[in-house]
């Protein structure tokens, strides 16, 4: 699978995307990148912890999918950023951060069309 190409496609969805990462469900990074000129708000250690937390939360959601259906995406909105997590397949997640004022609905719609196939 070409994780880097998919991660680059995700970055092209919108100039409002600050950060795009593809992880497996254990939070292991397959490909990751920041937009040029964007200042990291978290340390590397904090970013890795955030990815692992998102992956673990997604695994917990999957345990309920038989009753409520498969998750389509998760959105967390903070004062400074929005974090979007989208499943790419049964084993990988796309993790995006955007500026706080971004219209996330358009980004989510386009990102959900991406796939690792």
Image: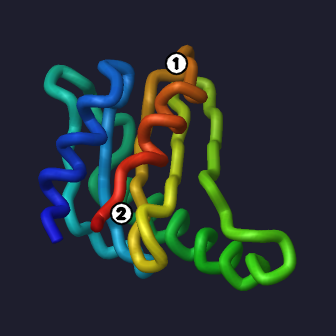
Residue 47 percent location from the top left of the image = 37, 54
Disc on res. 18: none
Label 2, secondary structure: give it: helix
Tell me the distance, in whole angstroms, between the alpha carbons under discs 1 and 2.
Answer: 24 Å
What is the residue that sits farthest to the right in this orientation? Answer: 67
Q: Are marks 1 and 2 in contact (CB under 8 Å)?
A: no
Disc on res. 48: 2
Q: Decide: is 46 above or below 108.
A: below
Residue corresponding to mark 1: 102
Residue at horizontal 63 percent and vertical 51 percent from the top: 74
User: Residue 15's quadrant in the figure?
Assistant: top left
**Looking at the image, which is closer to me, 37 or 31?**
31
Label 1, secondary structure: give it: loop
**Looking at the image, which is closer to me, 58 or 65?**
65
Q: Residues within 10 Å of mark 2 (few under 14, many from 20)?
A: some
Residue at horizontal 38 percent and vertical 21 percent from the top: 16
Q: Is residue 49 left or right of residue 2?
A: right
User: Residue 44's quadrant in the figure?
Assistant: bottom left
Residue 86 percent location from the top left of the image = 51, 54
Residue at horizontal 24 percent and vertical 30 percent from the top: 12
Q: Is residue 65 left or right of residue 103?
A: right
Residue 33 percent location from the top left of the image = 20, 45
Q: Is residue 58 left or right of residue 38?
A: right
**Among the two numbered marks 1 and 2 on one chain, the one whose residue lies closer to the N terminus:** 2
Residue 35 percent location from the top left of the image = 21, 30
Q: Quadrant of the N terminus?
A: bottom left
Q: Decide: is 50 above or below 90.
A: above
């Amino acid at each position: 699978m070409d994780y880097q190409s998919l991660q680059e496609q995700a970055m092209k969805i919108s100039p409002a995307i600050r950060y795009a990462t593809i992880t497996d469900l254990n939070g292991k990074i397959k490909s990751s990148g920041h937009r040029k000129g964007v200042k990291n708000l978290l340390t590397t250690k904090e970013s890795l912890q955030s990815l692992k937390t998102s992956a673990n939360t997604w695994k917990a959601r999957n345990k309920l999918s038989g009753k409520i259906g498969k998750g389509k995406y998760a959105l967390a909105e903070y004062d400074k950023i929005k974090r979007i997590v989208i499943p790419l397949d049964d084993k990988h997640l796309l993790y995006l951060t955007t500026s706080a004022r971004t219209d996330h609905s358009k980004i989510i719609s386009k990102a959900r069309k991406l796939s690792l196939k």
